[in-house]
Amino acid sequence: MFKDITLGQYFPGNSFLHKLDPRMKLVLAVFYIVLIFLAKSAPAYALVFLFTVLLIAVSGISFITVLKSLKPIFLVLIFTTLINIFWNNGTTVLFEWKFIVITLEGIIRAITMALRIILLMVSTSVILMYTTSPIALTDGLEQLLSPLAKIKIPVHTFAMMMTMALRFIPTLLEETQKIINAQKARGADFDSGNIITKAKALIPVLIPLLISQFRRAEELATAMECRCYRGGGGRTRMTILHFSVRDFISAGLVLALFAGILLLNFYFPALIK
């Protein structure tokens, strides 16, 4: 059930994206998310889509692996699509039956919203998760937030918690699958019955999963204490982060994409009014 989900995994490599400074990747990821929301016209969406495909190709990660990252949000995509199709204020009616009204504007809105969610998921996964190691991601996030340390905010602790939470997602999914397989071997049935029956069937999975995560957290805390971990105060780093030419090239490409989206929005009508 969960073996194909790639959310939160890191794939070592030597691609252009792998070599980028993690601070630059964090900034570009946030900026790229803003660009996705700025796209209004069909050519602007097409430009963002092509740029996302280019990111996947440059990263060296297979398209099948990237598509697997969409598995956790499949239900969200369906729900969002249906909501935008049936609840809208469109005027061009394509189908009407009793209280069900489907309009052209609703279909366009549903497609654009679904595409926006897919682009958000894929771009952040490729730019950050798949091509950035946990240590590099922690160092980059900590250095970007370092000004907040002057007002007594525990930046290092926050960065460590965020990175560990993201990186334990694959472990959590793997352990969930093991528990489900173990319960199936004991005769548990997770497929038959209505929604309430299926929800009750998940109780034998959730309880051992919750217990195992508390045990894992305790073991991790003990391991960190045994290694004399004391947070960010006075800690040194094996790798010192430096911006390179490729980082500025990446920033220039994203700025060019930003200008292209603004121009396309100006010269072409928006899909969603």
Image (cartoon, rainbow, N blue to C red):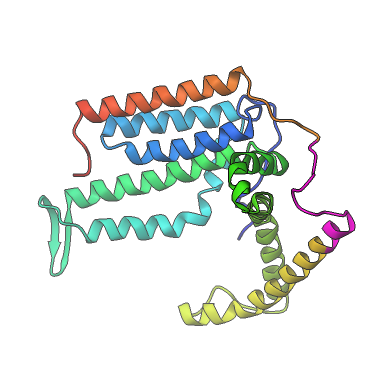
Q: Nearer the viewer, residue 38 or 186?
A: 38
Whether 226 is among the magenta residues is yes
Q: Is residue 214 left or right of residue 56?
A: right
State the residue at coordinates (22%, 61%): 87
Q: Is residue 123 above or below residue 184?
A: above
What is the quadrant of residue 57 in the picture? top right
Whether 78 is among the magenta residues is no
Q: What secondary structure prevails in the magenta region?
A: loop
- For the N terminus, the image quarter is bottom right
Q: In the rendered structure, which segment of residues is drawn in magenta?
A: 222-237
> Is there any visible trace of residue 6 in the rendered image?
no
- For the C terminus, the image quarter is top left
State the residue at coordinates (42%, 29%): 50
Q: Nearer the viewer, residue 158 or 234?
A: 234
Give the percent coordinates (x, y) of residue 178. Answer: 72, 65
What is the quadrant of residue 62 in the picture? top right
Q: Is residue 191 above or below residue 233?
A: below
What is the quadrant of residue 66 in the picture? top right
